[in-house]
Amino acid sequence: MGKTQEELQGKASDAPVAVRMSERLVTDAEMLGGMSFEVASTSGTACVGTLDKFRCVADVGCDHGYVSIYLVQRGIAESAIAMDVRKGPLSMAESNIAEFGLQGKAQVRLSDGLSELNEGEADALVIAGMGGKLMISILEKKDLRALGIRVAVLQPQSDIPEFRQYLRDKDYVILDERIVYEDGKYYFPMRVQIAGPETGDEQAAVAVPASGLEMVRQLFSQVDDESILRICNRYGEHNILRKDPLLKDFQAHGKEVAQSILKSLDEDIHVERISAIRQEISDIDMVLALYKQQ
């Protein structure tokens, strides 16, 4: 079940803008700071990290600017640059920033992706609500490490397995991932380490003792590495390790859809398609079996 507006209003004491935000947007913002988010482990022990703080966050595709405002109000970021390729949303964001009296801490900027962000301006990044391929194209046009980005929250709307693999290919580390179910759709925001913190940074993010991929390998010791990677790209290693209830629902629905498609295919004509769907069902069953374990 998603959070009600009343539950989200609990954030209002620290971030008054929260009452206007969806659960997805609040989750995106909270993930950047890492507050109260567990690091999954094979032992099932929850390790809670300290709140990570940033000098400045670049909020790409900012829409109404709520995430930028929230991050400043909560103290997760000292300042924010709300960026969008469209003038309409930027005008709304500017109006909202003024309404909350944050003109000195948050600014708006017309920008196609990260094109107008300069090196050293921001040490954190949020991109949410775009298609996975579009997000990859935005990230490819700029060197995030050269820009000085340390941590990013990225929430693609589509092509999610391909997006996770893209992050791995860039040697970015998926520190955490969440599932939000809202308005009949599942969302998968990811907290990603782009570059390590500077030496002596007291607000450095808590390091994950072992990669999520490695911990999933420990869970499925008899499964080959290629299959482990495929499963983690499909469903997210942190969601699997946490045995997230929403992942179980997501997979149960996915299995029903896959089985329905399978019944409509001809064994002689759709050989490759049938093989791929059966593999997907097998992957789902392997992960769902974890929920039966104590």
Image (spheres, helix red, strand yellow):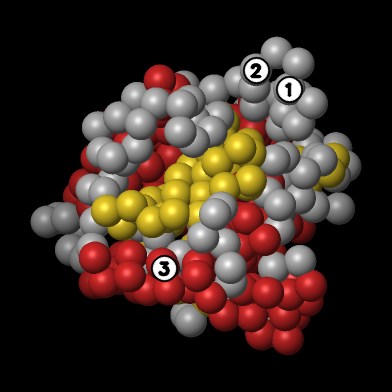
Residue occupied by mark 3: 93
Picture coordinates of residue 81, whole percent (x, y): 45, 49
Vertical comparison of 281 with 196: above or below:
below
Residue occupied by mark 1: 201
Picture coordinates of residue 274, whole percent (x, y): 27, 54
Q: Residue at x 49, y 36 (%)?
A: 122
* Cα gap from disc 2 to disc 1, whole angstroms: 6 Å
Q: Residue at x 44, y 22 (%)?
A: 145
Picture coordinates of residue 244, whole percent (x, y): 68, 58
Judged from the image, the secondary structure of the residue bearing numbered disc 2 is: loop
- Figure label count: 3
If you read the primary sequence from the N terminus, does the residue marked by circle 3 or circle 1 appear first?
3
Vertical comparison of 85 with 38: above or below:
below
Q: Residue at x 80, y 40 (%)?
A: 49
Q: Amino acid at mark 3?
A: Ala
Judged from the image, the secondary structure of the residue bearing numbered disc 1 is: loop
How many C-alpha atoms fall within 10 Å of the one at disc 3: few (<14), some, or many (≥20)? Answer: many
In the foreground, 246 or 3: 3
In the foreground, 217 or 167: 167
Among all residues in the image, which is located at the extreme left?
A: 269
* Cα gap from disc 3 to disc 2, whole angstroms: 31 Å
Tag nearer the camera, 3 or 2: 3
Q: Are marks 3 and 2 in contact (CB under 8 Å)?
A: no
Q: Are marks 2 and 1 in contact (CB under 8 Å)?
A: yes
How many C-alpha atoms fall within 10 Å of the one at disc 1: few (<14), some, or many (≥20)? Answer: few
- On screen, residue 82 versus residue 252, left or right, reads left
In the foreground, 145 or 27: 145
Residue occupied by mark 2: 198
- On screen, residue 183 versus residue 208, left or right, reads left
